[in-house]
Image: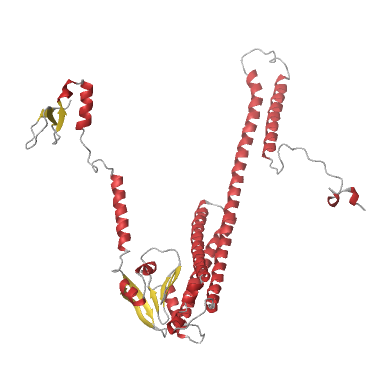
C-alpha cells in the first residue's frame, strides 16, 4: 500500500476546505477535497489512481529497434539532403568549344555560376547532377540551350559549345572516352551542313544507341546460352541464373522503353523542335511553326532503332517466359508421375493385403475342418492370389481411367455418331441441290 504524507507548499495558498497530499516519490502536491475521506475505500482508491498516477516519459520504454529505425531514417535523410544542396554543389564538366576542341577537361564549376552563365534554373541542373538518382531520360529545351539526360550522358548543348557533365566514379571509362572522341570528330566535320547543335545531338544519340545495342547483345548471349542449357538439364542453379537474367532483362527493357518515350515526346512537340534550332535563333532567323524537317528526320531515325531494340528485348522476354512455363509443365508432369507411381504401389499393396486376409483367417487357432483335406492348401492359395490380382487390377484400371485427360466433358463419355454426309453438304437445304 502506498504511503502518503501531508505537506505544506510554501508561497502557495489553497482554498478553504481542501487538504494537500503528495506521494513520497512525487514532487508535485495534489489537492483533495474534504469529502473524499467520507467516501468508500473503493472510490478513494479509484480517485487516487486517477489523480496520482505518474506520467511516463516518452522515451523511457521505447524499444531499441524503433530507435535504430529512426537513426537509420535520419542518416538516409541527411545523405539525401547533402546531395541536394542548392548552390554550393560543385559539378565536374568537360567543355567543347565551337570548333570541336576540348577546352576544359573535368573542370569544377558551381551550379550557381553555370545557371547564371547559360540562363538556366537551378532545378534544371538538378536533373543533370549525377549524384542525384535519376532514372527517367529527359530532353529539356530552354531558351539558349538543350539539356539532355539519357542513360550515361548528361550534357548541355548550345549553339557554339557543348558541356558534358562527368559521372562521378566513371570519368575515365571506355564508354565515355569513345563518346568524347566521336563527339570531337563530329563537331569538327562541317561538311554535312547540319547546325552545330544537331551534330552534337546526333553524337549523343548515337552513343546512347551504341550502349543499348552492346547491352542487348550481352544479355541476348547470356539468356540464349542459359536457355540452351535448360534444354539439356533442369536444376536449381540454372533456375537461379534464369531469375537473375530475367530481372536484368526487365530492367533493360524498361530503360530502353523510357528512352523511346523521351524521343517520342520531343517529336510530338512542334514548339520544342522549333526551339531546338539554336543557331538560327542566335542569328535571328525566323522559322515557320512546322519547319523542322531536318530535326524530325534525325529523331525519327533514332526512335526507330531504339524501337527495334525494345522489340528484340520483348521477344527475348517472351522466350524466357515460355521456357519458364514449359519447365513448370515438365516439373508438374514429373510430380504427377511420381504421385501416380505412389498410388499404383498403394493399390498393389491393397490387393496383396486382401489376399493375405484369407491366409490370416486360416491362421487362427480354430478348427475349420480343412486341415485334413489333401488339396485345401493349394485351393486357398489360388483363391488368395486370384482375389489379390482382382483387387489390384480393378484399382489400377480405375486409376488409369481417372488419369486419362480429354478435351471433351466427362459427362459425355459416349461418342456422337458420325454423320453420313460429307462436310461441305452438312446443314444445307435440299432445295439448293442441283
Identify which residue is drawn at 54% across, 70% down: 303
Decide which of 286, 53 is in the foreground and name it: 286
Q: Position of residue 353 (x, y in %)?
A: 63, 27
Q: Quadrant of residue 128?
A: bottom left
Furthest toward the right, the residue is 434
Identify which residue is drawn at 60% across, 39% down: 339
- Residue 210 appearing in the image: no
Q: How many marks?
A: 0
Q: Position of residue 153 (x, y in %)?
A: 43, 71
Decide which of 353, 288 is in the foreground and name it: 288
Question: Which of the image's four quarters has the N terminus?
Answer: top left
Residue 38 versus residue 216 in the image, above or below: above
Decide which of 185, 157 is in the foreground and name it: 157
Residue 129 versus residue 385 in the image, above or below: below
- Residue 321 appearing in the image: yes
Q: Position of residue 150 (x, y in %)?
A: 45, 69
Colouring mode (rainbow / by chain / secondary structure / one colour): secondary structure
Q: Position of residue 376 (x, y in %)?
A: 72, 19
Identify which residue is drawn at 66% across, 21% down: 358
Amino acid at each position: 500500500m502506498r504511503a502518503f504524507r501531508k505537506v505544506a507548499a510554501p508561497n502557495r495558498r489553497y482554498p478553504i476546505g481542501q487538504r494537500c497530499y503528495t506521494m513520497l516519490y512525487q514532487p508535485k502536491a495534489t489537492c483533495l477535497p474534504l469529502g473524499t475521506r467520507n467516501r468508500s475505500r473503493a472510490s478513494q482508491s479509484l480517485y487516487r489512481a486517477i489523480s496520482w498516477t505518474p506520467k511516463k516519459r516518452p522515451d523511457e520504454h521505447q524499444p531499441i529497434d524503433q530507435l535504430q529505425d529512426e537513426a537509420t531514417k535520419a542518416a538516409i535523410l541527411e545523405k539525401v539532403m547533402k546531395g541536394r544542396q542548392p548552390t554550393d554543389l560543385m559539378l565536374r564538366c568537360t567543355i567543347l568549344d565551337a570548333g570541336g576542341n576540348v577546352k576544359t577537361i573535368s573542370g569544377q564549376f558551381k551550379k550557381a555560376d553555370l545557371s547564371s552563365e547559360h540562363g538556366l534554373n537551378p532545378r534544371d541542373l538538378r536533373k543533370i547532377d549525377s549524384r542525384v538518382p535519376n532514372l527517367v531520360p529527359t530532353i529539356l529545351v530552354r531558351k539558349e540551350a538543350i539539356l539532355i539526360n539519357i542513360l550515361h550522358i548528361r550534357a548541355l548543348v548550345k549553339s557554339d559549345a557543348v558541356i558534358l557533365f562527368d559521372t562521378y566514379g566513371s570519368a575515365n571509362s571506355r564508354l565515355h572516352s569513345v563518346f568524347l572522341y566521336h563527339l570531337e570528330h563530329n563537331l569538327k566535320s562541317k561538311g554535312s551542313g547540319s547546325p552545330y547543335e544537331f551534330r552534337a545531338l546526333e553524337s549523343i544519340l548515337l552513343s546512347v544507341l551504341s550502349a543499348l545495342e552492346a547491352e542487348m547483345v550481352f544479355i541476348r548471349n547470356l539468356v540464349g546460352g542459359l536457355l540452351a542449357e535448360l534444354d539439356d538439364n533442369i536444376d536449381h542453379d540454372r533456375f537461379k541464373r534464369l531469375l537473375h537474367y530475367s530481372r536484368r532483362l526487365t530492367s533493360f527493357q524498361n530503360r530502353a522503353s523510357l528512352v523511346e518515350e523521351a524521343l517520342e515526346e520531343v517529336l510530338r512537340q512542334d514548339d520544342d523542335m522549333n526551339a531546338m534550332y539554336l543557331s538560327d535563333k542566335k542569328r535571328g532567323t525566323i522559322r515557320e511553326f512546322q519547319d523542322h524537317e531536318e530535326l524530325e528526320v534525325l529523331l525519327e531515325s533514332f526512335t526507330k532503332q531504339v524501337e527495334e531494340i525494345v522489340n528484340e528485348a520483348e521477344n527475348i522476354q517472351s522466350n524466357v517466359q515460355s521456357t519458364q512455363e514449359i519447365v513448370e509443365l515438365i516439373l508438374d508432369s514429373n510430380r504427377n508421375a511420381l504421385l501416380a507411381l505412389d498410388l499404383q504401389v498403394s493399390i498393389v499393396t491393397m490387393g496383396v493385403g486382401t489376399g493375405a486376409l484369407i491366409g490370416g483367417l486360416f491362421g487362427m487357432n480354430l478348427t475349420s475342418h480343412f486341415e485334413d483335406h489333401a488339396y485345401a492348401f493349394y485351393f486357398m492359395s489360388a483363391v488368395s492370389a486370384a482375389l489379390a490380382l482382382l483387387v489390384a487390377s480393378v484399382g489400377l484400371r480405375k486409376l488409369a481411367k481417372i488419369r486419362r485427360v480429354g478435351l471433351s466433358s466427362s459427362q459425355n463419355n459416349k461418342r456422337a455418331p458420325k454423320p453420313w454426309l460429307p462436310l461441305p453438304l452438312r446443314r444445307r437445304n435440299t432445295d439448293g441441290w442441283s
